[in-house]
Amino acid sequence: MTSPWANWAGNQTARATRVAHPSTTAELASVLTGAASEGLRVKAVGSGHSFTPTALTDGVRIELDRMASLVRVEGNLVTVQAGMKLAALNATLAAHGLAMPNLGDIDAQTISGALSTGTHGTGAAYGCLSTFIEALELVTADGTVLRCSATEQPDLFAAARVNIGALGVLTEVTLRCVPAFILQADERPAPLSDVWSGLDTHIAENDHFEFYWFPYTDRVQMKRNNIVPAADRPLAGWRRWLDDDFLSNTVFGGACRLGRALPSTVPAISRVSARALSARTYTAPSHEVFCTPRRVRFVEMEYGVPRAALREAFDGLRSVVAGLPYKIQFPVEVRFTAADDIWLSHGYGRENAYIAIHQYAGAPFEEYFQRFEAITTPLGGRPHWGKMNYRDAASLATAYPKFADFTALRDKLDPGRLFANAYTERVLG
């Protein structure tokens, strides 16, 4: 047996029989057919930024660190190997005068992991990151290499762009990028009432809008990012360090440790935090605005709901927070995305509002997460595939119109369930 593997949050661990580091598609195919012949299950893992057990296996763990290179650049179409991390992708694109159209706020994930779980940013005109895929390649359970796009095996393309690792191992992705661009970031505290009174305007008039609510307060931090012609207001290095490193990581981490030890202090800490971050406006390359360092460890649940259901879900969440027997130390993040046509995307067929809830690592969270899930499920809530949830296949089948199509394709590509584990058995059947 190998040494134990753990995810970033530390809430998921596993010990595989062996670990494989293939460097070519042929080597990967050999690993898969060899594991199948031994009766071992297989999981490809990325950087461990999923909070679910999606990457756990006691069979063969595949790490794609040797399949993490740039393949080619053809205009705005960029093909990379699936083991590349988003931070490396962003640097590679910048060197070619390109950028991803949108990003989430963490860049530590591998491309394969981020895409396969439906990772997203915010912005009414943008779907999840998987909507930027032009074509992809994956290796299936019998070692077959399949390529797909909107015109080549379109059903596979609709399924594989968000597939939770259940159809095969992603090896290459061609991304539809855009010329590198500058964002102006405007971040400022505000009353929660300002968000609700102007929500439609905030969403419609900004390229990217989100807000963070501080539990036990009526305060939020609003973030508005908009494309501008030039980087004419760079953020001073000391201010970036103060806000993004010292306050958001060092000081916040200390506050979380204090709150975990002395729960009665949490509401006061939240009130101070809500007013500690002052307003700032600056310009920078897009990936530097979208992505921020996250060193304070936490567990997370995130649900996408129809945008019209956001207020009901959010008000229900506030009631949950008020009634818990313990305190919540992390702000709640709310983001917005466009509809898409990817079978297991949380945004399939509808504009989404996302509510992400967090709890500091080591602090209690299950009642919080379960009660929030109970509110969002009847509203049409769809859980982020890489973040904690307690749903099963029967309940998810009603949330995704193409769920049966996905599982039928899974039956065809992986009838022996080489890529299955307890998580996929629960959420896919």
Image: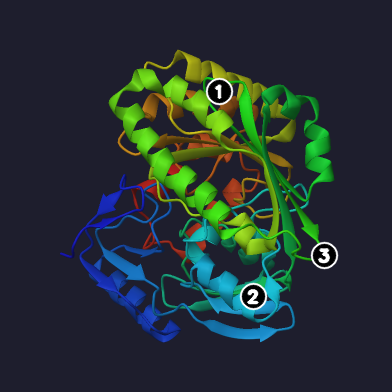
Question: Which is closer to the viewer, label 2 or label 1?
Answer: 2
Which residue, given by chain and number where applicable, does mark 1 sit on? 317
Q: Quadrant of the C terminus?
A: top left
Amino acid type of the residue tagged 3 in the rendering: Pro
The residue at 68%/59% (across/down) is: 102
Q: Position of residue 117 (x, y in %)?
A: 52, 54
Q: For the residues carrying marks 2 and 3, which lies nearer the camera in this image?
A: 3
Residues 202 and 79: in front is: 202
Q: Are marks 2 and 1 in contact (CB under 8 Å)?
A: no
Is residue 72 visible in the rendered structure shown here? yes
Q: Secondary structure at mark 1?
A: helix
Q: Quadrant of residue 89?
A: bottom right
**Marks 1, 3: nearer the viewer:** 3
Q: CA distance from mark 1 to mark 3?
A: 39 Å
Disc on the earlier residue, 2 or 1 = 2
Q: Earlier in the sequence, mark 1 or mark 3?
A: 3
Graded by Cα atoms within 10 Å as few (under 14), some (14 to 19) or many (20 or more), the crowding at tag 2 reads some
**Relative horizontal placement of residue 147, taking residue 21 as reference (left or right):** right
Q: Whole-percent x and y of residue 211?
A: 65, 37
Q: Amino acid at mark 1?
A: Leu
If the image is split into quadrants, where does the N terminus sit? bottom left
Q: Tag 1: Cα neighbours inside 10 Å, few (<14), some, or many (≥20)?
A: many
Q: Residue at x 29, y 57 (%)?
A: 57
- Tell me the colour scheme of the image: rainbow
